[in-house]
Amino acid sequence: VSLSHDSAVPVYRQLAGLLRKRIATGVLAPGAPLPSESSLMGEYGISRDTVRKAMDVLREEGLAVTVQGKGSYVTTSVDSQG
Amino acid sequence: VSLSHDSAVPVYRQLAGLLRKRIATGVLAPGAPLPSESSLMGEYGISRDTVRKAMDVLREEGLAVTVQGKGSYVTTSVDSQG
DNA sequence: TGGGATTTGTTCGTATGTATC
DNA sequence: TGATACATACGAACAAATCCC
């Protein structure tokens, strides 16, 4: 699995889609920690800025929650307020 | 206070003028921090590029100084070298 | 109590591409 | 052609929260 800079789809959206699929398929279960920013940077050879934009997307979609100093986690029922 | 895209005056110059007035009237005193790029982006619904162009104008006029990782500040006497 | 490592939060610096006027 | 404006992407610095020893 890799990301392309030669795509019409921005890299940060490609990464968001990739993580979204892991969540949808249960590879990342509710409450599970998502990879840290630095690990995603290293794994895909992208900048922190791009990683964070991808996380922004997932948070807006309600799929992830982030805690400063800890990390990001797949949303659980208690994280949802709807 | 808002900015218009339907003006002969570019948005970045409108923003520069708006901040210049705040400085002139003392709303923003010497040494005071100016709003961050992201807050100005959000407040006026404009891009970072446009915000930065406005700050360029203020710096050229000697009204503001900018420090990476910190922010921009209204010029004080010690900031001036003339 | 303290210090270091890890992680996220926020800020500015720079470059490139695209679209519009 | 050039100025304006937005989006994307990578860097760099500083700040704050967490965790562990």
Image (cartoon, coloured by chain):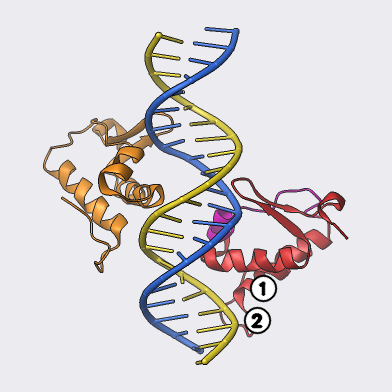
Chain colours: A orange, B red, C blue, D yellow
Name which residue type carries label 2.
Val
Which region is colored magenta? B27-42
- Say if residue A52 shows up in the picture: yes
Question: Where the C terminus of chain A falls, by quadrant?
Answer: top left
Give the secondary structure at mark 2.
Answer: loop
Label 1 Cα neighbours within 10 Å, binned few <14 / some 14-19 / many ≥20: some
Q: Position of residue B62 (x, y in %)?
A: 78, 63
Label 1 and label 2: CA atoms lie apart by 7 Å
Residue A15, relative to residue B16: is it above or below?
above
Closer-to-camera residue (B32/B77): B77
Q: Mark 2 points at which residue?
A: B9
Q: Mark 1 points at which residue?
A: B14
Residue B43, relative to residue A25: is it above or below?
below
Check contact, mark 1 vs mark 2: CB within 8 A: yes
Q: Which chain carries label 1?
A: B
Q: Which chain carries label 2?
A: B
Left or right, A73 with respect to B67, comes to left
